[in-house]
Image: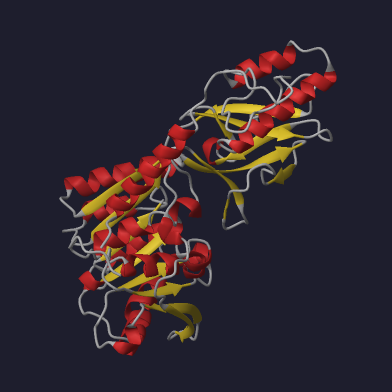
């Protein structure tokens, strides 16, 4: 078994090695003709530039338009070849870059400014078609963003190939140097579980769309398994790659094999807004319908409710209202600010559910409410984990942290022996 800590440490060592190989030399590069304008193969510092500000100053001090554009081309080639774009000048300083001769303005909107492009304008470098904007973020931050052209055209960053799927389509992704991309969300050459679609009709004749994940080897064993119920089920599969994560964690023995039930809401705003009829249907009809069909370990400790945003609020509601059913609660960026969920936890006779809290510093209202909930759980001596990330309200964040919740609920004891 390979623990997540070992995975991250290994990737971090590789990242440090790569970064060390890319340290600037701060010397002037010349081409074979000695012009001093182009990068020499293997030379890591752009010709004559000690920093982005030094490059900007050089362009301002150059009067010839062709020379200005040559300087821009040289810097852009350097930026793409080293850190990529957005250009990372160090572990915290980011420079968004855009080249266009057909626009009059550019701005950036993303997790870090509440998706509001106001007062987020790029500066146009005099005499060129280069637009730029500098920002500072934490070394481990990961953020979604888009560029906004001429005040109305929202686009992916054309110079950044890295994107992240979202509920309203893909966004460009900025990952700072210390951020470790989650390997578990990728599809690996390992045994895979199966996902099948199901329809459940409740006592009110309402139909619910489900997808059932069975772990690898389910059909050839008589074992029983814990079960996790995911709100916003299709998005967990389509945007968060939950099947890949389950396959990965099971294969590398980071969690016990788990069955997953991915449930789509019919009316999300109603179902996930303190709808006690929905809670009763889910707990007293859906769960008893699902579980006799599969080999499920008995007891609430073997059952989890997992959700994001309003779905995270719903997971907290399910857990405090029906601890007899749900002994584990995974809540990502929960909408705790909405309604009386904090009061319910404060007034409960006891809190027996294991609770995984997850929030980002770039979703300030949710982050602050989640920290208040963590303090409340601490005062009540609840069993909980509170994870904080320099990220925003994004499937890019949630998909990378599902493993944290599942390993908290159903870990496998480390043996030091990795599977073949």
- Can residue 109 be seen by looking at this rendering? yes
Instruction: Give x and y (percent) for residue 34.
Output: 71, 20
Where is 106 relative to 215, above or below?
above
In this rendering, the count of numbered labels is: 0
Q: Nearer the viewer, residue 24 or 329?
A: 24
Q: Please name the residue shown 53% across and 69% down the image.
A: 267
Q: Is residue 267 above or below residue 159?
A: below
Q: Residue at x 46, y 78 (%)?
A: 211
Direction front: furthest residue? 32
Quadrant housing the C terminus: bottom left
Q: In front here: 348 or 257?
A: 257
Q: Residue at x 34, y 71 (%)?
A: 228
- Residue 255 is situated, as x and y percent measured from the top left of the image, at 27, 66
Residue 173: x %, y % from top left: 56, 45
In the depicted structure, whether residue 223 falls above or below residue 142: below
* Residue 121 appears in the picture as rendered: no
- Quadrant of the rendered structure where residue 133 is? top right
Q: Nearer the viewer, residue 260 or 183?
A: 183
Relative depth, front residue between 337 and 97 = 97
């Amino acid at each position: 078994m390979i623990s997540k800590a070992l995975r991250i440490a290994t990737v971090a060592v590789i990242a440090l090695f790569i970064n060390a190989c890319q340290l600037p030399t701060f010397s002037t590069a010349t081409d074979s003709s000695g012009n001093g304008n182009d990068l020499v193969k293997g030379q890591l510092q752009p010709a004559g530039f000690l920093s982005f500000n030094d490059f900007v100053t050089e362009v301002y001090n150059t009067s010839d338009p062709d020379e200005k554009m040559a300087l821009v081309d040289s810097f852009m080639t350097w930026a793409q070849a080293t850190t990529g774009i957005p250009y990372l000048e160090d572990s915290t300083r980011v420079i968004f870059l855009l080249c266009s001769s057909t626009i009059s303005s550019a701005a950036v909107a993303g997790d870090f400014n509440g998706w509001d492009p106001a007062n987020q304008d790029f500066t146009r470098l005099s005499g060129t078609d280069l637009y730029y904007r500098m920002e500072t973020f934490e070394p481990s931050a990961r953020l979604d963003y888009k560029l906004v052209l001429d005040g109305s055209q929202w686009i992916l960053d054309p110079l950044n190939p890295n994107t992240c799927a979202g509920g309203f389509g893909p966004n460009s992704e900025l990952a700072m140097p210390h951020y470790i991309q989650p390997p578990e969300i990728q599809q690996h050459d390992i045994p895979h579980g199966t996902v099948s679609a199901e329809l459940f009709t409740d006592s009110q004749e309402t139909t619910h769309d489900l997808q059932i994940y069975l772990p690898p080897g389910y059909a050839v064993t008589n074992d029983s398994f814990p079960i996790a119920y995911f709100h916003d089920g299709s998005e967990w599969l389509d945007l968060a790659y939950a099947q890949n994560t389950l396959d990965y964690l099971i294969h590398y023995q980071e969690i016990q094999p788990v069955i997953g039930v991915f449930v789509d809401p019919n009316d999300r705003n109603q179902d996930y807004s303190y709808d006690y009829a929905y809670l009763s249907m889910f707990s007293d009809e859906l769960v008893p319908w699902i579980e006799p069909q599969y080999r499920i370990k008995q007891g609430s400790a073997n059952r989890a409710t997992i959700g994001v945003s309003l779905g995270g609020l719903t997971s907290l509601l399910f857990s405090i209202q029906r601890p007899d059913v749900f002994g584990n609660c995974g809540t990502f960026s929960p909408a705790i600010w909405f309604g009386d969920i904090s009061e319910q936890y404060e007034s409960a006779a006891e809190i027996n559910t294991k609770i995984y809290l997850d929030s980002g510093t770039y979703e300030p209202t949710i982050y602050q409410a989640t920290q208040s909930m963590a303090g409340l759980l601490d005062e009540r001596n609840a069993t909980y984990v509170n994870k904080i990330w320099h990220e925003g309200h994004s499937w890019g964040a949630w998909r990378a942290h599902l493993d944290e919740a599942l390993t908290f609920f159903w870990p496998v004891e480390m043996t030091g022996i990795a599977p073949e």
